[in-house]
Structures are given as structure tokens and as C-alpha cells.
Image (cartoon, grey):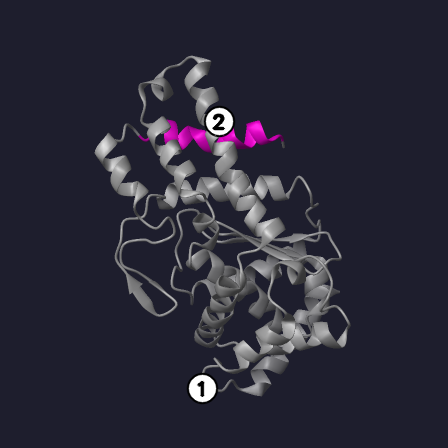
């Protein structure tokens, strides 16, 4: 899908949202873009105004997902996709944001690389190569939980340049944006192409940075524990990549901190709760059955 089509698809709900005053835009411009009022992120409660609403986050995420699908092909294995959604939603329901505007949706990319992407608003992609590298369901759940943690912490939204989002809000509330002619829509389209580019480049090209990746690892351990999965399997999955000699590949490993450092961080932050190993074995059987 072309970028202009993606941006125009995202614009519709914003054009219908009404006008923002100059004062409101000034207030929004000073607020952290990824923080919501009363949202708990990594154990801390933040109370601040968030300029990106849940609805806007959803449409930004859909536009970013469309950009990702211009580079990757979706798997046509519907059985595997349904299974990944089952596991992913079980973890999402145990997260700090269990109910999103558009819900959580998980899709498998037909690629052998080790990678996963968390689009704002709840769309999560995982490659077939990542699923194949996992040894059981708990390791798969760990990868998905890490991506869910990025969504919970608004990490994708935080990558939008504040100046660009302020410009977008001002343009959406301007009289030009309400005109039926092409000038206002063209202006907004150009701005929101930049918004989508900011998020896409962070997710796919540059990564979130070491601090946010470590935080996502730590947060996902709690999600896994609440959902009944073994959080230590996050560490085990990374060890699998090292054993398979894949810890220096591109994709997910290119945009994340060194695998050994992540393992140490996870080991130091594991919850104390223990999981029944027989349940892990049962889930491993279900995992293998889904791959057949």
C-alpha cells in the first residue's frame, strides 16, 4: 500500500474529531506522548495528559501495520494464526492494558528471520522463523509478551516527534482541515505520513533503544506470571538463539540489546512464583501440534 493511501486511511477519524483550541494544543505539546491518565507502566502510576487518544493510537497502528505488510507477506496458515492469537490474547488479558480500542490482533509473517513487531493500538506481528526457533508454548508466549509490553508502555507512540504531533493536532483543528477541498486533506496527509514514518522506522529499522527494551523484558515477565506461563522461558528462548548461533543475526536481534545482556537482566528480575512444570509440558504438546 502506498504511503499516501495509508496516511489518508488514518486521517478520517481525525477529520471527524472536531476542532482543538490553540490553548489545548499548547497543553498537549508539553505532555509526554506515551503517557495516559492513571495508567500503570512498569509498576509506576503516571498521571499526565496524553495527546494521542486510544482511537488515534489504533489508527496510527493500522497505518504502521500496512507499512510493515508492504515488506512482509502474511502466512496463509490459518491454524497457526488462530493458535498465536489464542496465546497472545491470553497474555494480553493479563497485561496492564487488557482492553484496547480495537483489541489485540496477532498475525504470523511468512519469513524465516527472527523478528516481531508491536504496532501501537494492539497489532502484533511475529515471523514464522521466530515461532520455529521457540521450543514450546511458554517461549512463544514470552516473545508475544515482550511485544505486548511495548504496546502497554506506548513505546511506539513515544517515537513520534513531539513537534510533528503538535503540528498534526493544530492542522486537524484548523479550518483548512474541515474544508471539502483537497488542500486541507493534502496538508494533513503529508503530516501524518511523517507520524507513521516515525513509528515505522523505530519499530522496524532503529529499535526502541536499550532502556525501553530492558523495561519491556522486565514488564513482560509479570504478564507471563499473571497468565500462568513460566516467565523464565523468556531467558530460555534467548539462550536457544545463542545455542543455534542466531544471536548475531539481523531482524529482532539487530534492533535489541546484546542477547547475553538481556538474559542477565531477565535473570535478575524474574518473579518468585513457580509454575507447575507439568503444565509447561502440556502446553508444549499443544505448541508442537499447532506446527504440524
Q: Residue at x 37, y 21 (%)?
A: 177
Q: Residue at x 60, y 63 (%)?
A: 256
Task: In the rendered view, tell whether residue 99 sits above or below residue 195.
Answer: below
| Residue 8, magenta (yes or no) | yes
Distance, label 2 to label 1, CA atoms, is 49 Å
Q: Which residue is mark 1?
A: 272
In this view, the residue in front, 210 or 113, is 210
Q: Residue at x 36, y 36 (%)?
A: 166
Q: Quadrant of the N terminus?
A: top right
Q: Image check: 84 left or right of 167?
A: right
Q: Quadrant of the C terminus?
A: bottom right
Q: Which residue is mark 2?
A: 189
Q: Secondary structure at mark 2?
A: helix
Decide which of tag 2 and tag 1 comes sooner along the chain: 2
Q: Is residue 230 visible?
A: no
In this view, the residue in front, 96 or 94, is 96
Q: Residue 158: horizontal and vertical position, in percent?
A: 43, 50
Q: Residue furthest top?
A: 181
Task: Write the start and end of the magenta stretch as one range.
Answer: 2-17
Q: Is residue 104 visible?
A: yes
Q: Main secondary structure of the magenta part?
A: helix
| Residue 241, magenta (yes or no) | no
Mark number, residue 12:
none
In this view, the residue in front, 250 or 103, is 250
Q: Residue 182: horizontal and vertical position, in percent?
A: 46, 15
Q: Image check: 177 left or right of 246?
A: left
Task: In the rendered view, tell whether residue 157 sits above or below residue 116.
Answer: above
Amino acid at each position: 500500500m502506498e504511503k499516501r493511501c495509508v496516511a489518508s486511511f488514518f486521517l478520517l477519524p481525525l477529520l471527524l474529531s472536531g476542532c482543538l483550541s490553540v490553548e489545548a494544543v499548547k497543553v498537549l505539546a508539553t505532555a509526554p506522548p506515551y503517557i495516559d491518565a492513571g495508567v500503570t507502566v512498569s509498576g509506576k502510576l503516571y498521571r499526565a495528559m496524553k495527546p494521542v487518544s486510544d482511537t488515534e493510537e489504533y489508527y496510527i497502528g493500522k497505518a504502521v501495520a500496512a507499512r510493515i505488510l508492504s515488506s512482509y507477506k502474511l502466512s496463509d496458515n490459518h491454524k497457526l494464526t488462530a493458535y498465536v492469537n489464542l496465546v497472545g490474547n491470553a497474555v494480553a488479558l493479563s497485561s496492564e492494558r487488557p482492553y484496547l480500542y480495537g483489541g489485540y490482533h496477532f498475525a504470523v509473517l511468512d519469513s524465516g528471520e527472527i523478528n516481531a513487531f508491536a504496532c501501537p493500538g494492539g497489532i502484533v506481528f511475529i515471523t514464522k522463523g521466530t515461532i520455529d526457533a521457540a521450543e514450546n508454548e511458554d517461549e512463544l508466549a514470552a516473545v508475544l509478551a515482550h511485544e505486548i509490553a511495548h504496546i502497554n508502555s506506548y513505546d511506539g507512540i513515544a517515537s513520534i516527534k513531539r513537534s510533528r504531533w503538535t503540528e498534526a493536532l493544530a492542522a486537524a483543528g484548523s479550518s483548512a482541515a474541515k474544508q471539502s477541498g483537497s488542500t486541507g486533506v493534502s496538508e494533513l496527509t503529508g503530516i501524518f505520513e511523517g507520524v507513521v514514518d516515525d513509528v515505522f522506522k523505530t519499530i522496524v529499522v532503529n529499535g526502541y533503544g536499550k532502556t525501553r527494551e530492558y523495561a519491556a523484558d522486565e514488564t513482560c515477565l509479570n504478564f507471563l506470571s499473571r497468565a500462568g506461563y513460566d516467565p523464565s522461558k523468556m531467558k530460555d528462548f534467548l539462550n536457544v538463539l545463542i545455542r543455534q548461533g542466531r544471536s548475531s543475526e539481523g531482524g529482532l536481534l539487530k534492533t535489541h540489546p546484546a542477547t547475553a545482556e538481556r538474559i542477565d537482566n531477565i535473570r535478575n528480575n524474574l518473579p518468585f512464583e513457580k509454575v507447575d512444570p507439568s503444565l509447561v509440558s502440556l502446553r508444549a504438546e499443544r505448541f508442537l501440534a499447532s506446527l504440524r
